[in-house]
Amino acid sequence: MSESADIIMFERGDYVSFANCGLPYHIGGDIESRDALLLQTPQSFKQRFNVDVRVRSNVEAINPLAQTVTVRNLDSNECYQQPYDKLLLSPGAKSIAPAIDGLSNNRTFTLRTLPDMDQIQTLIDRDQPSHATVLGGGFIGLEAAEALRQRGIDVALVELGPQVMANVDAEMASPLHQELADHGVDLRLATALMSVEDNGDSLALKLSNGASLTTELLILATGVKPETELAEQAGIALGANGGIKVNSRMETSITNIFAAGDAVEHVDLVTGQPALIPLAGPANRQGRIAADNMLGSDKHYKATQGTSVCRVFDLTIAATGSSEKALLKAKRKYEKIYVHPMNHAGYFPGATAVSLKLLFEPNDGVILGAQAVGKDGVDKRIDVIAMAIRAKLTVFDLEEQELCYAPPYGSAKDVVNLAGFVAANYLRGESDICQVDDVLAPNPQQVVLDVRNPPELINTGAIEGAVNIPLDSLRERLNELDRDKEYLVSCMVGLRAHVATRLLINSGFKAKNMTGGFKTYQMVLAAKAVTS
Amino acid sequence: MSESADIIMFERGDYVSFANCGLPYHIGGDIESRDALLLQTPQSFKQRFNVDVRVRSNVEAINPLAQTVTVRNLDSNECYQQPYDKLLLSPGAKSIAPAIDGLSNNRTFTLRTLPDMDQIQTLIDRDQPSHATVLGGGFIGLEAAEALRQRGIDVALVELGPQVMANVDAEMASPLHQELADHGVDLRLATALMSVEDNGDSLALKLSNGASLTTELLILATGVKPETELAEQAGIALGANGGIKVNSRMETSITNIFAAGDAVEHVDLVTGQPALIPLAGPANRQGRIAADNMLGSDKHYKATQGTSVCRVFDLTIAATGSSEKALLKAKRKYEKIYVHPMNHAGYFPGATAVSLKLLFEPNDGVILGAQAVGKDGVDKRIDVIAMAIRAKLTVFDLEEQELCYAPPYGSAKDVVNLAGFVAANYLRGESDICQVDDVLAPNPQQVVLDVRNPPELINTGAIEGAVNIPLDSLRERLNELDRDKEYLVSCMVGLRAHVATRLLINSGFKAKNMTGGFKTYQMVLAAKAVTS
Ligand SMILES: Cc1cc2nc3c(=O)[nH]c(=O)nc-3n(C[C@H](O)[C@H](O)[C@H](O)COP(=O)(O)OP(=O)(O)OC[C@H]3O[C@@H](n4cnc5c(N)ncnc54)[C@H](O)[C@@H]3O)c2cc1C
Ligand SMILES: Cc1cc2nc3c(=O)[nH]c(=O)nc-3n(C[C@H](O)[C@H](O)[C@H](O)COP(=O)(O)OP(=O)(O)OC[C@H]3O[C@@H](n4cnc5c(N)ncnc54)[C@H](O)[C@@H]3O)c2cc1C
Ligand SMILES: CC(C)(COP(=O)(O)OP(=O)(O)OC[C@H]1O[C@@H](n2cnc3c(N)ncnc32)[C@H](O)[C@@H]1OP(=O)(O)O)[C@@H](O)C(=O)NCCC(=O)NCCS
Ligand SMILES: CC(C)(COP(=O)(O)OP(=O)(O)OC[C@H]1O[C@@H](n2cnc3c(N)ncnc32)[C@H](O)[C@@H]1OP(=O)(O)O)[C@@H](O)C(=O)NCCC(=O)NCCS
């Protein structure tokens, strides 16, 4: 933006512009060259952008009155004052380690920086460990577990909560649990690590359920929190969640000091509430806006919607906007539907299902959030819905959206359209829905009706207490039904139950479609099984 | 929607609910089973939906006053009158054959229906042809050419226009020409078929450039036009482009007669003009709306944006909204930029470039259209932009859009963001751009400046008449430049030229970035080479 500005960048570590997001993939071997993770060097920054990059330089204090920072050169161990006109704080976040005895040992690491990665690599190369443990099932823990499995190491994944990937709802995470197990990950959900004992060539881990694990490598992936010490010491205001508070111009509470990235609190696009959303896309865009404003522009960062994606072996999970959990917490009204259509035309080889959960406003249909899991095409659908959420569109807009269709890519009615159809049908009162929880505890006036074919029940399982009448004989067997009852109708994914529900309603019965069918039922039950 | 309505469906062919879009993929062998193309049968429609499907029943006339249709049973050859309360016309489109002598022979086919496909398959199985010719390079022609290559047949593709895939702009189609050639397709652009002579075991084709071809199979893929004979005879109004005219409720000019699909004219979302857009997604959604309205709903189909995608061997090409050609024709003001970023993090293996062209309003930045070509992730970006166009968003919205990012899926600054950055930088006056055409014909006050490194010029080619100063030495070599000139700056994709342009502007020079860099330059030149 400016040739005349003197720009200095301080970094306490050895590297700038490194791709943290690539760290697990280098451990796993997908990214072969370590150098590939270094996108820019101090030299290239100097040459191309005339930026004076000072690595191994720890900023120890900010002195807002003097408009200086105190910097320690970590090589000479000397301190100096560096004056500034404008200051950008982007210290990022730091890994949180749980308060457990015995974590300080040379087999336990976090995974945030290149040196972290190097240490893990060194241990693996040196010891050829046969067993490693990952603590925490967020995206970094999942990526780490996969990377270790790719290196042929047995992996235990210990997670305190009842699910991995806490930013999605439990039932949507449950296919990941199966996937992890299928790839040999020893998954311990709803389990805390209690203590660690260093036995030299291994660690003895004690778990909350009384079990113990002998492991040679322990990776802590229990989340991050904003690096705010410097800011706090300088008297910069923090927000409700403990991140640096900024306005939409990325200005902190102190004049001439800006902040961006994992260290700051974002406004959540859907709830309007402050939130910590430590992701690279927002960090990059906030940095760009802050820089422009420091040079006199007036640009605004609006809000973060938390669009995120994670590869878990052959599955992809992605989400955007609010989860159901988040909406419950924010006391927002919502409705939800599930669909499980194919990622592309079913008649084209290689089609796989995308399981999608859509959350929306019950009154006007405004989309609040979406989560999807499947083998292929998951990120695409979430990106499309992310755009719709940003534009404050409704489920009715998804219904009519025109997306790329040719057999290898999608369907004439795409996953996104179908989610729109189902939600819009419900909101227009054309097809009432119920949830798995309703089917699990029907009231005396309700009957659960499964319209799948008998072989399907045998092959994939039946719903306890459900009456079975296959859709294609329903019209002839209406006389078996009771007009005083309400039918909670289920099939495999919700399509046949929709047709059955319409048929029943049009024939004078009361009926609701259990949204997402037996597939959702299984996902919900699997999630419930963890805690029960 | 209704159990009480009597629903009859007439189809002159043998099949209903077949997947036309799958026809080329069955010929090519991707879709092995012919049955996979039959999604529903008359029996399944009857059983599930209580619809009376009458195949081999040609509707010969509509009698609006009597509210009947005249139907000929093609087996008994008898006619009968069928009364209706509401009538839906969805006769689709028919293949246009060019007015050429000799097309009636048993080696020449269109590809619209299952019987068409069967005939082509039969000929291939029987004759094992070594050479086939496809006439027309639209998506059906391209898919047919690929299918025939997959069967090991030599293929000539003859196209009247200077490019294949006429719905995108010529420079965006040019990578397809290379891809076709690389896969052994003998591509004859800007070439007409003049005559066909049947020699029994082969056809002799005469081309407009004097060349001739001996071929054993000729597939006509020269476009479709709406099936409107029935409608015209009944006095139903047609639109400006010759399709059936409908309102947003899908009603024709005659009460109680609705129409949907390839036979009708759509409103183009971007230009607001009537247009023929024969695609399966719009057809499916229109049918759904028409059906609901016939049963008393009041639903509206808004507009079609022409989102489309085609696989051409290892490339994908996709588009949404208006092309530059279409905007020129509609006399709409527009601006355009090009970017060529990677489909996912460059440091993650397998990254490939997505070449994207974005068209937008010069005043307010409203997105008008987008086209993309590449190996992977093309459909995703076009789908995201399709959603943005539908919501009437601007390039500034693309700039801040939050999309799925993890190394295997995207980048912290996704392709879509980057396109937004470049367009928004231009509109805000932060980075002026110029086009390849400007660089091809600079005025005397302009100097073309290439900021790539010398080895790149040797390896990929130089821009004629350009001065070469690598970006990383530009700052030291500013004294070689002239403040009275305007520099048209180019690099490989536009990134380094952007940095150079900013550097020059901030140092008091006049400069513009040639959008899309040398990659776009090559695409434009390749497109121009066809016609020159
Ligand atoms: C293993 C891993 C995988 C990830 N994968 C993804 C992903 O797939 N998708 C995604 O969106 N996000 C991912 N992230 C998150 C993403 O990397 C962060 O959101 C992003 O890096 C934040 O950028 P930042 O500049 O705010 O902070 P950082 O990248 O953390 O940079 C902050 C820098 O400031 C330095 N620093 C801090 N304090 C001082 C001081 N006092 N003096 C000098 N220097 C200081 C630190 O050393 C650090 O280098 C991942 C993160 C990790 C660790
Ligand atoms: C080879 C091929 C590939 C394609 N690929 C794609 C693709 O990848 N993506 C995409 O979006 N679109 C694609 N399309 C286009 C898509 O198939 C059409 O847009 C869609 O089928 C239109 O549906 P429709 O119901 O309007 O017409 P049609 O599917 O053509 O159906 C009309 C039916 O009406 C019958 N009919 C007509 N007149 C009468 C009469 N008088 N009496 C009785 N019956 C009558 C016809 O026999 C026909 O079966 C492709 C088309 C073809 C041919
Ligand atoms: C790699 C890195 C240095 C790139 O930063 P950058 O140079 O600002 O980003 P880009 O290369 O994408 O773009 C630079 C500029 O060129 C512009 N540009 C890029 N491609 C362009 C093109 N084809 N035409 C015109 N302009 C272009 C962009 O708009 C941007 O300019 P702007 O901000 O003025 O709009 C930075 O992202 C980084 O350090 N990343 C590593 C850390 C990280 O992101 N980690 C978390 C994820 S692993
Ligand atoms: C295959 C075909 C018969 C399917 O038509 P369909 O039964 O109307 O379509 P679907 O199966 O997608 O959905 C049917 C209904 O079930 C609903 N539905 C689908 N899945 C559902 C789910 N999981 N939960 C609730 N409802 C669901 C849909 O919303 C739709 O109902 P609505 O219109 O009342 O909203 C029809 O698309 C067809 O004939 N296609 C072949 C021709 C073709 O498209 N050719 C061109 C491309 S090759």
Image: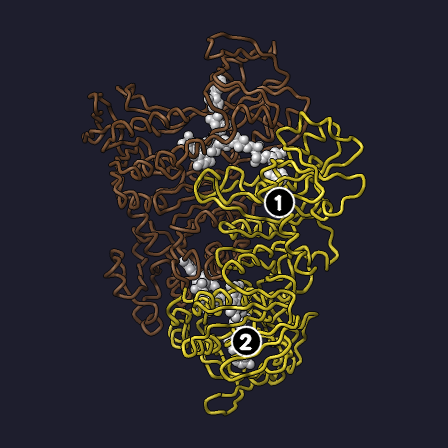
Chain colours: A yellow, B brown
Q: Are marks 1 and 2 on the same chain?
A: yes
* Disc 1/disc 2 C-alpha distance (Å): 37 Å
Q: Nearer the viewer, residue A156 or A293?
A: A156
Q: Residue at x 59, y 33 (%)?
A: B301
Q: Chain of mark 2?
A: A
**Amino acid at dot 2:** Thr
**Amino acid at dot 1:** Gly
Pointer 1 local density, CA inside 10 Å: few below 14, some 14–19, many at least 20 = few
Dot 2: element: strand
Quarter of the image for the N terminus of chain B: give it. top right
Q: Position of residue B368 (x, y in %)?
A: 49, 44
Instruction: Left or right? Give the position of B189 relative to A291.
Output: left
Asked if residue B408 is positioned above or below residue A221 in the image, the reply reads above
Q: How many marks?
A: 2
**Residue at the disc numbered 1:** A461
Dot 1: element: loop
Q: Chain of mark 1?
A: A
Q: Position of residue A182 (x, y in %)?
A: 51, 58
Residue A287 appears in the figure: no
User: Residue A214's mark?
Assistant: 2
Which quadrant of the figure shows ligand 3?
bottom left
Dots 1, 2 in contact, CB < 8 A: no
Q: Position of residue B360 (x, y in %)?
A: 48, 47
Q: Earlier in the sequence, mark 1 or mark 2?
A: 2
Instruction: Left or right? Give the position of B415 relative to A283.
Output: left
Pointer 2 local density, CA inside 10 Å: few below 14, some 14–19, many at least 20 = some
